[in-house]
């Protein structure tokens, strides 16, 4: 289901998928690009969504920065790739934000949950998508399907 999760299990990390910034870069980071595959669950089934994860030098005291590179119609992900997931926030009101004990595996599982059980229509990042779902669930599903066919194969 998750190619990134399997890489995290192997070799105690992501060897081969990591690329570093140049040494002259004052905030050297590690960047990971991989796909999350959603199978047989919910609106986004059979979609392949690519994410970019930047791991800063201060990791794991600060969360990684994650962006969705695949265009998507989702209440918690904007069409430009910003993601609303509390565990990616340093300070979260609900107490589920980033903590030094969290790992990249937690990030992968959190991203997966955005496609299965954490669709937040009450406090969305993409308000238009959430309102679309509220007004017409069938048309929302059709638009999601169209985006998957066009961008997530």
Image (cartoon, grey):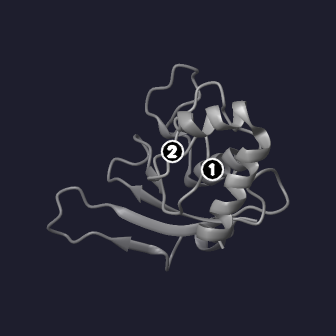
Asked whether the beta carbons under mark 2 and mark 1 sit within 8 Å of each other, the answer is: yes
Note whether 83 is above or below 147 in the view shown. Answer: above
Image quadrant where residue 12 sits:
bottom right
Q: Residue furthest right?
A: 40
Element under disc 1:
helix
Q: Which residue lies at the image location 52% right of the left edge and 19% below the top edge?
A: 93
Q: Position of residue 26 (x, y in %)?
A: 17, 57
Q: Position of residue 38 (x, y in %)?
A: 74, 61
Q: Which residue lies at the image location 55% right of the left edge and 40% below the top edge?
A: 101
Image quadrant where residue 47 sits:
bottom right
Q: In the rendered image, which residue does mark 1 sit on? A: 111
| Left or right: where 106 falls relative to 126 | right
**For the residue carrying disc 2, how many other residues have a C-alpha within 10 Å: few (<14), some (14-19), or many (20+)?**
many
Element under disc 2:
loop
The mark nearer the N terminus, 2 or 1, is: 2
Is 30 or 73 nearer to us in this picture? 73
Q: Is residue 5 visible?
A: no
Q: Position of residue 86 (x, y in %)?
A: 55, 34
Q: Is residue 150 visible?
A: yes
**For the residue carrying disc 1, how many other residues have a C-alpha within 10 Å: few (<14), some (14-19), or many (20+)?**
many
The numbered mark at residue 83 is 2
């Amino acid at each position: 289901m998750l190619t990134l999760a399997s890489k995290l299990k192997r070799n105690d990390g992501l060897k081969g998928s990591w690329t570093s910034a140049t040494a002259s870069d004052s905030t050297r980071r590690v960047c990971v690009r991989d796909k999350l595959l959603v199978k047989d669950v919910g609106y986004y089934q059979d979609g392949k969504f690519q994410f970019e994860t930047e791991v800063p030098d201060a990791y794991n005291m600060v969360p990684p920065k994650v962006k969705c590179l695949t265009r998507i119609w989702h209440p918690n992900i904007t069409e430009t790739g910003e993601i609303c997931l509390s565990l990616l926030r340093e300070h979260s009101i609900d107490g589920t934000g980033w903590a030094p004990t969290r790992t990249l595996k937690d990030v992968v599982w959190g991203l997966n949950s955005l496609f299965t059980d954490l669709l937040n229509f009450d406090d969305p990042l993409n308000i238009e998508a959430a309102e679309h779902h509220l007004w017409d669930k069938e048309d929302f599903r059709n638009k999601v399907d169209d985006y998957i066919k066009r961008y997530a194969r």
